[in-house]
Image (tube, rainbow, N blue to C red):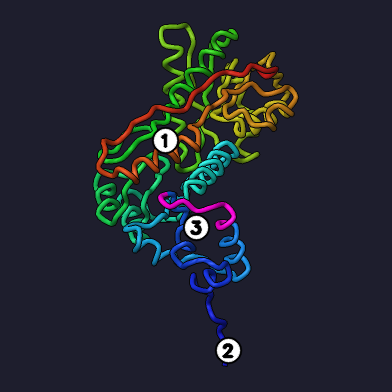
Amino acid sequence: MVQIPNTPTSADVARLAGVSRATVSYVLNNTSAVRISEATRRRVHEAARELGYVPHAAARSLRAGHSRMVLMPAPAIPVGPLYSRFLSELQGALGRLDYTVVQYGSVGLEGDEAARAWAELRPVAVLVPGAGLGPQGVAVLKRSGARAVVTLGPGRVEGAHALLMDHDTVGHCAGAHLYDRGCRRIGVVMPEESGLEVYARPRLAGVREALRGTDAAVMELPLAYTEEAAAELAARWPESGLDGVFAYNDEYAMLLMRALQDEGVRIPEDVAVIGADDLMLGRLLRPRLSTVHIELPSGRDLAALVDRAVRDPGGEPEVHTVLGASVIRRESS
C-alpha cells in the first residue's frame, strides 16, 4: 500500500512561523488591507517554503468570490519571437498583480464554441488573440463568472474590451517606403499558412492605400513557408517584372531573399526587399534586411487594463488602438 504523505496546511505554516492562520492568509494572498511587517512576511514565506505549502486555489477562489486565473487561449497560428516576448512580458506583469496566467490549447475549437470550453475553467479574465470570438461567446464567458474579456485583433466585439491591432499601418509603411525608394512594380507576399490571412489582408490593404493614386502597381504573391515554395517563386521572378517586395514579415523576407539570391537576383539592385517585426536575425543577413519595426502594446499596460476590468466588471468596455509602426531602412532596400 502506498503511503500518501500528509499535505501541509496553513495551520502548520502558522505554527512554524509563530503567527496566526489569519496572518498566513494575509501574507500568502498578498492582502494589502492589513499592515504586516516585512520581517513577519519573510517568516511566513520561509515557513511555507520549508513545508512545501501552497495555497489551495479553489478555497482561495471561494473566499474571494472569483478565481485569480487569467486564461489566454493559445494562438491557432504560428507566433514569432516578437509576439512571444510580448506574451512573456504580459505574463510577468499579471503575475506581479497576483493573477495566475494559464494558456489553453483549443485545437479544433473556434469562436463561440471555444468560448464555452474556456468558460468551463471559470477564469476571472480571458485574453483572446486574433478574430473569431463573437458577442454570444463574450456573454457565455461573463455568465460563467469572467469579469473581463479582452480581445486583441482587428475589430471590436460587443461586450468586450478591445485592443485594436492596426496591421494596415504596417503595410502602409512598407508600401510608402518602397515607392519612395523608386519601386513601381511591388509584390506583397501573402502567407499560405492557415490563420495568417487575418494579418496579411490588412497589410496588403495598407500597401494598396499607400500607393493609391500613384503610378505603382501591386501584385499578390502567395507563398508557403518552405524552401521549395520560395525557390519556385524565385525561379519565376524575372517574368514578373517586380522591382520591390514587401514580404509580410522578416521570416518570409529572409526565406525569399535567400531563394532570390540563389537565382542570381541582386538585392537591392534588382529588387528591394522589406520585412516586418525587426528581428535580430535580419540585421545579421547580407545585405541587412530593411524592416517595419512594430510596437506591440505594453504587457504592463494590458495587465493594468485586466486588473481595472476585474475590479469594475460593470464598467464601460475600453477600446485602444495599438500597434505602432515605423520603417527601419537597411541595405536590402
Q: Is 307 drawn above or below residue 10 in the view shown?
A: above
For this view, does 191 lie left or right of residue 62? right
Q: Amino acid at mark 2?
A: Val
Q: What residue is at 34 percent from the left and 46 percent from the top?
A: 310
**Badge 2 local density, few (<14 within 10 Å), some, or many (20+)?**
few
Q: Earlier in the sequence, mark 3 or mark 2?
A: 2
**Residue 35 on the magenta segment:** yes
Residue located beneath label 3 in the image: 27
Q: CA distance from mark 3 to mark 1?
A: 45 Å
Q: Nearer the viewer, residue 202 or 87?
A: 87
Name the disc covering residue 2, or none. 2
| View extreme (bottom): residue | 1
Q: Nearer the viewer, residue 201 or 124?
A: 124
**Badge 3 local density, few (<14 within 10 Å), some, or many (20+)?**
many
Rendering quarter of residue 228 = top right
**Badge 1 local density, few (<14 within 10 Å), some, or many (20+)?**
some
Rendering quarter of residue 41 = bottom right
Residue located beneath label 1 in the image: 198
